[in-house]
Image: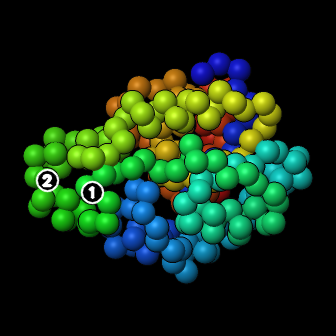
Amino acid sequence: MQNLPPIWLLRHGQTEWNAEQRVQGQMESCLTQLGIQQARRQAELMKPILSQRPLCFVSPLGRAQQTADIALGGAPFETDARLAEICAGDFQGRTNAEVAQGFPELFANNSTTLDLYCAAPGGEGFDMFQSRISDFLATLTGPTVVVAHALLGQVMRGIVCSLGRTEMGKLSKDQGCIYLLKDGKEQVLR
């Protein structure tokens, strides 16, 4: 996408289900103590950014809201449903091992988490997921902070950096950092 303003993208901190290697998708799971520490680390990184008064948007899911409450240090934010994580259909609530056992062919044929979740029966799929992220990006009018999720972050970063789906699925999904997206490039702030 052309002519996008700078975006500071934060993934939520570690959740109980992240620690259990359980598929969250659009289901809820609370931050762990590590996740809270990661959000506090983001809060330190955000101080100079927030002094610029960027617009802040957050996924409606609890883990992103909890992270935003910590990382944005009380700065106002707007909740936007387009920032929810991908709906992973029948995979949601299952551990990775249960997905591998219950859907062996899908598990074997989709090497990245992004590809696997996009292939989930009853799920959202890549095209709809990418479309709602692109729709959100098209509405941005100035420097913006986004607090969201791993796969949403991969696709958003991929769109901004003009990557294909395969490359998107290989992007990092780190917690406790900030991805600065500016001029079609990505920089990780730690």
Instruction: Answer few, some or many: residues within 10 Å of disc 1's Cα (few below 14, many 20 plus, some between 14 and 19).
Output: many
Instruction: Answer above or below: position of 52 versus 21.
Output: above
The quadrant of the rendering that contains the C terminus is: bottom right
Q: Position of residue 170 (x, y in %)?
A: 38, 41
Q: Is residue 170 left or right of residue 132?
A: left
* Residue 169 in view: yes
Q: Residue at x 48, y 37 (%)?
A: 155
- The residue closer to the viewer here, 176 or 80, is 80
**Separation of residues labelled 1 and 2 (CA atoms):** 9 Å
Looking at the image, the residue that sits furthest to the top is 2
Q: Which element carries disc 1, helix, strand or loop?
A: helix
Q: Position of residue 131 (x, y in %)?
A: 49, 30
Asked whether disc 1 touches disc 2, contact meaning CB atoms under 8 Å apart, the reply is: yes
Q: Which residue is mark 1?
A: 91
Q: Residue at x 39, y 30 (%)?
A: 127
First-in-chain label (1 vs 2): 1
Q: Position of residue 69 (x, y in %)?
A: 71, 67
Q: Residue at x 19, y 65 (%)?
A: 97
Q: Which residue is mark 2?
A: 103
Give the residue type at disc 2: Phe
Instruction: Answer few, some or many: residues within 10 Å of disc 2's Cα (few below 14, many 20 plus, some between 14 and 19).
Output: some
The quadrant of the rendering that contains the N terminus is: top right
Q: Is residue 18 left or right of residue 136?
A: left
Give the residue type at disc 1: Phe
* Residue 12 in view: no
